[in-house]
Image (cartoon, rainbow, N blue to C red):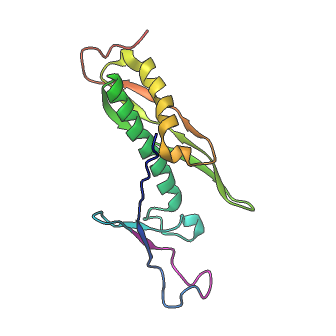
């Protein structure tokens, strides 16, 4: 089987030079803009713990969002293929990062709330989360655990009675 390659490009523009550049740790802002062709600009900064602007996205939040979005896309794809109708999906992922000699994430936990048209398919829907995790490009690129704790809700439809 031929290996497909996909290439991605973004532009990160540092906008935090207050006129002194990086003359000192406190001389500059952590602000930046993320650009990609044909897309809205995303305002970025550091986490407020690292002198960042709390009104902007930070790299740690973007990592959580990337893992969550990739998992969701695979999950919805697998549900569609398996005949599991999802009427709603909301994830509230959380991650833990530690500082030390080398700061790093130790884990991410996805907490999707999935509204199923037919709650009797809950067992199959849960199994599809494992398959989505195995397929997720972003999770496969990380060196720490990504956990998933789904919650299933009944959607509108005649077959939304709880499973036994």
* Main SS category, magenta section: loop
User: Based on the displayed image, in which of its 4 quarters is residue 122 positioned?
Assistant: top left
Point out the residue furthest to the bottom here.
Answer: 19
Above or below — where is 23 with respect to 114? below
Q: Residue at x 50, y 47 (%)?
A: 138
Q: Does the stretch in magenta take in 33? A: yes
Residue nearest the viewer, comparing 133 with 91: 133
Q: Position of residue 37 (x, y in %)?
A: 31, 66
Q: Is residue 36 left or right of residue 123?
A: left
Q: Residue furthest top?
A: 164
Q: Quadrant of residue 34?
A: bottom left
In this orientation, which residue lies closer to the viewer: 40 or 37? 37
Residue farthest toward the right in the current orientation of the protein: 101
Q: Tell me what residue is drawn at x 44 percent, y 79 percent.
A: 15
Q: Is residue 25 above or below residue 139?
A: below
The quarter in which the C terminus is drawn is top left
Q: Give the image location of residue 80, x and y in percent.
A: 32, 29
In the image, what residue occupies the spot 42% across and 24% down? Answer: 125
- Locate residue 130 relative to residue 162 in the image: left or right: right
- Expressed as whole percent of the image width and height from the top left, the position of residue 149 reads 52, 32
Q: Is residue 119 left or right of residue 137?
A: left
As drawn, 119 above or below 9 = above
The magenta-colored residue range is 23-34
């Amino acid at each position: 089987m031929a290996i497909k390659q996909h290439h991605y490009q973004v532009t990160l523009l540092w906008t935090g030079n207050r006129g002194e550049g990086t003359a000192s740790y406190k001389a500059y802002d952590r602000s930046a803009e993320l650009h990609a062709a044909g897309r809205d600009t995303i305002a970025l900064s550091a986490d407020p713990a690292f002198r960042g602007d709390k009104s902007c996205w930070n790299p740690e939040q973007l990592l959580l969002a990337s893992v969550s979005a990739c998992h969701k896309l695979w999950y919805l794809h697998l549900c569609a293929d398996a005949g599991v109708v999802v009427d709603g999906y909301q994830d509230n992922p959380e991650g833990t990062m530690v500082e030390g000699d080398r700061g790093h994430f130790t884990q991410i936990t996805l907490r999707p709330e999935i509204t199923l048209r037919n709650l009797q398919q809950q067992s199959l829907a849960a199994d599809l989360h494992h398959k989505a995790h195995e397929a997720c490009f972003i999770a496969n690129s990380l060196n720490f655990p990504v956990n998933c704790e789904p919650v299933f809700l009944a959607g509108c439809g005649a077959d939304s009675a709880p499973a036994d």
